Amino acid sequence: MTAGKLDHAHDEESQTQRPDRKPLVVGLAIIAVIVIAAAALIPQMRSGSAPQEESHNEVDVHFLGMMVPHHEQAIEMSDVLLASDVEDAQVRDLAQRIKDGQERENEQMRAWADEWGIQEDMELHSNHIANGMFQPEEMEEFASLEGDQLRTTFLEMMHYHHKHVIEMTQGEIQNGAYAPLREMAQEMVDVQTAEMREMEDLLR
């Protein structure tokens, strides 16, 4: 066999023994594309499945508008009791807890109102007297009371005030969209229901 034929035979043998790498390269390229695409989709899937905590609806807006002035009146009533000559330590402790809790809730609700840019809605409701709130003349008469009469009237009026909060809060719990506000509304129900029982015991 001539040298040329030997070289040709050697080339053919090398080609038959050498594996074709093209399918492997193409396969690796396809896998790389799939991995990159999956990595890009994962954050989108997470963001799509996560609750949109920032969202709120008209129920949330209405609740803030009505609840903030309602809380303000309860705080005012508590201030009257705390500044009075009523010595009953249990009643004074109750008034202080109501004041502290509702001031804290109002601070948070006003912060949400600022975030949502709903000052016009807040102002619209700021002068409403509803849901168990008392008229200005009733508040003036309450502030003029002293001693046992003030103690008893405070417990009776605050019980009535709380009762209507619980009623108006159900709408937020059931239909509100903003989860932190719904949680606060449920806490209002729990705390004020317990405080109403406490008032009933103190009145007895």
Image: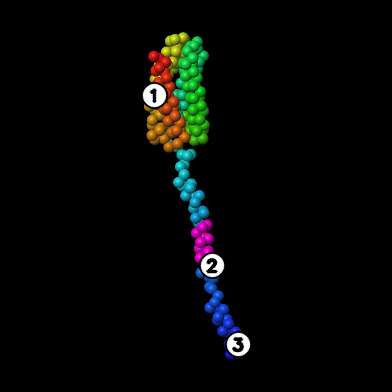
User: Do callouts 1 and 3 mark residues in contact (Cβ within 8 Å)?
Assistant: no
Secondary element under disc 3, as helix, strand or loop, is helix
- Which is nearer the N-term, disc 1 or disc 3? 3
Q: Which mark is residue 4?
A: 3
Q: Confirm whether residue 192 shows in the render.
A: yes
Q: Which amino acid is tagged 2? A: Val
Residue 135 is a magenta residue: no
The answer for how far apart the CA atoms under marks 1 and 2 are is 73 Å
Closer to the camera, 120 or 115? 115
The quadrant of the picture occupied by the C terminus is top left
Residue at 51%, 61% in the rendered image: 31
Q: Residue under circle 1? A: 164
Provide the residue designation for mark 2: 25
Left or right: 168 in relation to 112? left
Residue found at x 60% / y 84%: 7
Residue 138 % position (x, y): 42, 15
Front residue of 139/37: it is 37
> Do residues under tags 1 and 2 come within 8 Å of each other at their CB atoms?
no
Which amino acid lies under the numbered mark 1 shown in the image of this protein? Answer: His
Tag 2 secondary structure? helix
Secondary structure at numbered mark 1: helix
